[in-house]
Image: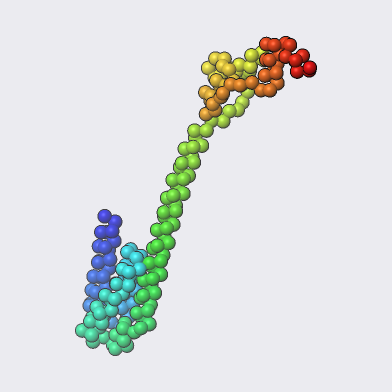
Amino acid sequence: MKMLLKALVLVAAFAGYALALRYVVPSSEPWFLLGIGIVALAAAAFGIPAGVATAVLLLPLTTLVYEQFAVSTSYAGMAESPAYIVAELSVAVVAGLMRTRLRRLAERSNLLAATSEHLQNSLSQVQELGGVHNLCSSCKSIQDDDGQWLTVDAYLKLKTKMEFSHCLCPACAGHFRRSIDPDEEQDRAV
């Protein structure tokens, strides 16, 4: 739909240019310079090839109108001059490059917005533990927001994405072995 609208605007601009040349050409103004704007419009809407094609199509139209209505030869010669044609082609290239850069900028902006939204969603899922919590001095259970007492590992699993496996640190493992086999320390000494 967007391309169709651009095409309609370009056709309307082309028709307006032809009508302006037809009905306004006998004046003393160089109306053919409007063609540069149409070339820029075509290149900005559809890219460099469309701008170049528009410049190529405008040349015979302008020449035809100027010859038909016997406009001063200086304007007719100017409209066909290499300098004017180069100006149209330059405008086509510049407008086409600007179109390409704007499209890339829009793509990068969309990517940045999507990444930002993803990061915001990730941040909203992060729960920060803070504040003062009741911790039992004896069994080290912690009281949650509902007043229930949970082991520290159960509380952290509930509040975060942490997972736990249970094991013994070296100091506790040694204490545990001594409580099971009190003679083990004497065996080691020997």
Q: Say how many tags the image has.
A: 0
Q: Is residue 151 left or right of residue 98?
A: right
Q: Residue furthest right?
A: 190
What residue appears at the point 46 percent right and 49 percent down from the top-left corner? 112
Q: Nearer the viewer, residue 162 or 41?
A: 162
Q: Residue furthest front?
A: 190
Residue 132, horizontal then vertical, whole percent: 63, 23
Looking at the image, residue 135 lies above or below residue 18 = above
Give left or right: position of 148 versus 117. Answer: right
Placement of the N terminus among the 4 image quadrants: bottom left
| Residue 103 image offset from top left, x and y in percent | 40, 58
Residue lying at 27% horizontally and 68% vertically, measured from the top left: 13
Residue at far bottom of view: 73
Coloring scheme used: rainbow
- Of 68 and 144, nearer the camera is 144
Q: Is residue 173 above or below residue 115?
A: above
Quarter-of-image position of residue 135: top right
Please indicate whether residue 154 sits to the left or right of residue 87 in the image: right
Residue for point 31% across, 82% down: 79
Using the rendered view, name the quadrant where residue 190 is placed. top right
Q: Residue 62 in the image: x percent, y percent?
A: 26, 79
Residue 54 place in picture, x, y as percent: 29, 72
Residue 41 showing in the rendered view: no
Examine the rendering and report whether any part of residue 63 can be seen: yes
Is residue 128 positioned above or below 92 on the image?
Answer: above
Residue at image point 42% right, 50% down: 110
On screen, residue 65 above or below 150: below
